[in-house]
Image: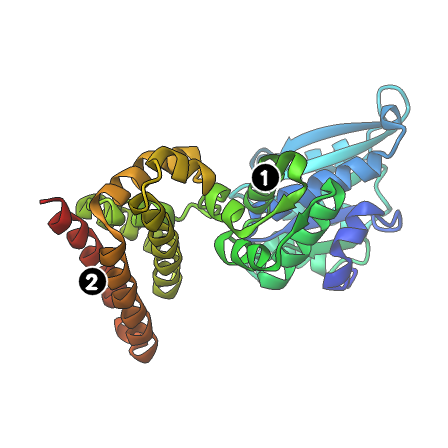
Amino acid sequence: MMVAIPRSDYDSFCEDPDPRYPIVLIYGPNRGLVSERIDKLLKNVRGKSADDFTVVTLDGDALASDPGRISDEANTIGLFGGRRVLHIRAGSRSFADGLKPLLTGPTPEAFIAIEAGDLAKNSPLRTVCEAAKSAAVIPCYDDDARTIAALIDSSLLRAGIAMDRDAKETLVSLVGSDRLSTRAEIEKLVFYAGETKRITLPDVRAVVADASGLAIDDVLDAASAGDSKAALRALAAARAEGTSPASILNAAIRHLSSLHRMSLQVEAGEDTESVLKRNRVFWRRMDDHKRALRRLGSRSLENALIALGEAELESRRSSALADAIAERAILSLAERGKRKAS
């Protein structure tokens, strides 16, 4: 039977792979995490003496057409006498039959790391690996809030950067479930923090892109600038990617709160450009913020915030209508901007 690795030990296994298990299957819907763990595993199998190991990358679909090739590759001695590492990238075709002799017979000469996407419980590859004593199986599921928070903590610790609590909570709520996308957002924040060595809530709001491909920023920027068509397109994209109506409405409230603060500063006589820079608005959103501030004064923003708060409460009371409520609130914001501009 497969090696039952506790979920808490998945990463430590990749850091220090047990030589008793020459075949490792890493699979799951979180492709970023699959890629990260495969890279870590291969690096640590090779160790410091990388020249002693030759990594050979094989295509799973090609192996499906030539099942015997896996055994041939696994039992071939390296050109310079070192141990070989086979990195097999699974595709749409099963190569499980070619893998069976290595799972049931003598220990192969090579170390075999298999990288796969989301596999059904009854998929041939997953079935043969889970039934074998010589295989370790590591699933990679989508990151949840707990794992995202732990990833943020470990990344910032290595970078020597602190993060405010509200900034961390907001970052956890904004990033997606894919590991590589989340790491990319953290790296951007680390770069943005620079010599200050601290990440604040305005930093997160200014820098964090839609890590999971969602279009919340586009929704809010278009709506507050009065572009209802662009807002609806972005809203459809956000919903298609799985963004909840509650997330959209809460993000809209935060966005308008920030605009309201900046609007008060502009109305007090400050230059718009200076206000945007002092509030550390990300450069790609500068023009949208300028249009919003021209369209929406502080009083209009206050009324819009009240309307959004009511919409958020209504969506919680009537969850079945949440999508329609969010769409109506976004359109109302866009029309409010147009009315002021006309």
Q: Please name the residue shown 14% across and 49% down the image.
A: 340
- Residue 2 visible in the picture: no
Residue 45 is situated, as x and y percent measured from the top left of the image, at: 83, 38
Residue 260 is situated, as x and y percent measured from the top left of the image, at: 33, 53
Disc 1 marks a residue whose amino acid type is: Ala
The answer to which quarter of the image holds residue 61 is top right
Label 2 crowd (10 A; few <14 / some 14-19 / many >=20): few
Residue nearest the observer in this picture, 91 or 307: 307
Q: Quadrant of the C terminus?
A: top left
Instruction: Select label 2 or label 1 by which is in front.
Output: 2
Q: Please name the residue shown 57% across and 49% down the image.
A: 200
Q: In the figure, is residue 71 to the left or right of 230?
A: right
Disc 2 is placed on an element classified as helix
Residue nearest the observer in this picture, 152 or 270: 270
Q: Please name the residue shown 30% across and 63% down the image.
A: 305
Residue nearest the observer in this picture, 331 or 203: 203
Q: Earlier in the sequence, mark 2 or mark 1?
A: 1
Residue 254 is situated, as x and y percent measured from the top left of the image, at: 40, 57
List the residue tagged with mark 1. Answer: 64
- Residue 224 visible in the picture: yes
Q: Please name the residue shown 64% across and 48% down the image.
A: 96
The answer to which quarter of the image holds residue 137 is bottom right
Residue 39 is situated, as x and y percent measured from the top left of the image, at: 71, 38
Disc 1 is placed on an element classified as helix
List the residue tagged with mark 2. Answer: 328
Residue nearest the observer in this picture, 308 or 211: 308
Q: In the figure, is residue 250 to the left or right of 93?
A: left
Q: Quadrant of the N terminus?
A: bottom right
